[in-house]
Amino acid sequence: MRSESSALTDQGATILTITAQDPEDTADFVARNPAPFPMLSDSDRAVMKAYDVHNALSFEGFNIAHPAVFLIDPAGIVRWRFVGSNQLEWPQTSIVAEKLAGLQAGGPA
């Protein structure tokens, strides 16, 4: 999604990435891998748990998050979500852009 983020920001979306790493590790990663959007740290996993994407234990790791994308309106209401079943499952950016356009048009995601 990093390379295609303009497909969403051109529609007015704000993109944030949240990682389970501590703030120092997140800052180091961003320094080595700049992204066109902010990367935030959720080292205590509070956000991941609140959005029900925390994965305490699986064959892929422990205390990590499922890959997820949320479309949240200006009032803070989640209007659409995608939660991957494994670390390689992400939605195509075109699908997220389509859902965003539908929400902006006043329809369902």
Image (spheres, grey):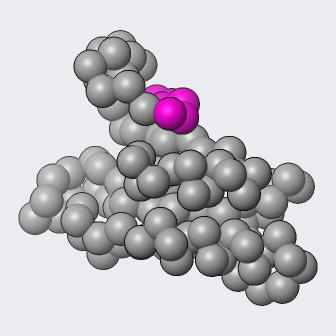
Rendered residue at 43%/32% (across/down):
35
In the displayed structure, does residue 57 sit left or right of residue 23? left
Rendered residue at 56%/70% (across/down):
96
Indicate the quadrant where residue 84 lies.
bottom left
In the displayed structure, does residue 35 sit left or right of residue 109? left
Is 102 magenta? The answer is: no
Up/down of 31 relative to 39, above or below: above
Up/down of 80 relative to 87, above or below: below
The percent position of residue 19, horizontal first and vertical second, equals 40, 39
**Residues shaded magenta:** 36-42
Up/down of 90 relative to 57, above or below: below
The C terminus lies in which quarter of the figure? bottom right
The percent position of residue 102, horizontal first and vertical second, equals 75, 79
The N terminus lies in which quarter of the figure? bottom left
Rendered residue at 39%/48% (across/down):
3
Q: Nearer the viewer, residue 88 or 64?
A: 88
